[in-house]
Amino acid sequence: MRHVLIIAALFLASPALAQTAPPTEGPISCTSPIAATDTANSLKQRFGDEAVMQDLPGAEGETYKGLVLFPRAMDRRIEVGFIEDKAATVSGFTLRDTAKTSRWSVAGISIGASLAAVQKANGKPFAVAGFGWDYGGYVTDFKNGALGRTLPGGCSVTIRFGTEKDTPRALSGDGVKVTSDNPALLKLAPVVTEIGVNFAAK
């Protein structure tokens, strides 16, 4: 009888356990799978062995200490940064094209998305920085489109495009900015290689 009661208790508890399990793919919001109130410790508690501290690539060849979710699954990988690298409070997180694709999406955009897909989600053309330097390919201005607004929950989005093609001089270098409907940029056909979700400074 005791054995039957234990099995019944586990059966009743399993739906609740399933509901509290952290997501492993799907749409990302300002609160899931990571929230502004998270710390390295809270993420480690929630994700267990799937949360590992690592040195991550920063701007201009620098590195910073961050936390990686799903470090062994390149299409699920999320890189988490912290305020002043102290692992006390999350500042934001990044999806990269480590697998040329991702099982996550942000505001309907995922790794590998085209200019047209991002422009559709934004609702209008946007500006992209010239390629071939440390900040190349980033969207510099969403031109008051949907992707430039604060998302429900208080976070914001950054998007970077990349290409493996030879880039024309007119689309290269610091100081160059082109709109997403520029014919030369459309011909180059860059795709989204990085998506950042950023929390407001506290």
Image (spheres, rainbow, N blue to C red):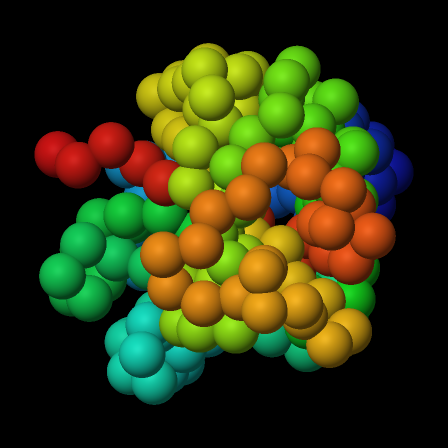
At x 55%, y 16%, the residue is 146
Question: 102 or 175, which lies in front?
Answer: 175
At x 64%, y 18%, the residue is 124
Whether residue 180 is situated above or below residue 45 in the rendered picture: above
Question: 165 or 35, which lies in front?
Answer: 165
**Residue 200 appears at what percent x and percent y?**
24, 32
Relative to 154, 112 lies left or right = right
Question: 35 or 7, which lies in front?
Answer: 35
Question: 166 or 39, which lies in front?
Answer: 166
Of the 4 image quadrants, the one containing the C terminus is top left
Relative to 104, 58 lies left or right = left
Whether residue 38 is situated above or below residue 78 in the rendered picture: above
Relative to 77, 163 lies left or right = right
**Residue 11 appears at what percent x and percent y?**
82, 33
Of the 4 image quadrants, the one containing the N terminus is top right
At x 56%, y 30%, the residue is 126
Q: Quadrant of residue 162?
A: bottom right
Q: Quadrant of residue 9?
A: top right
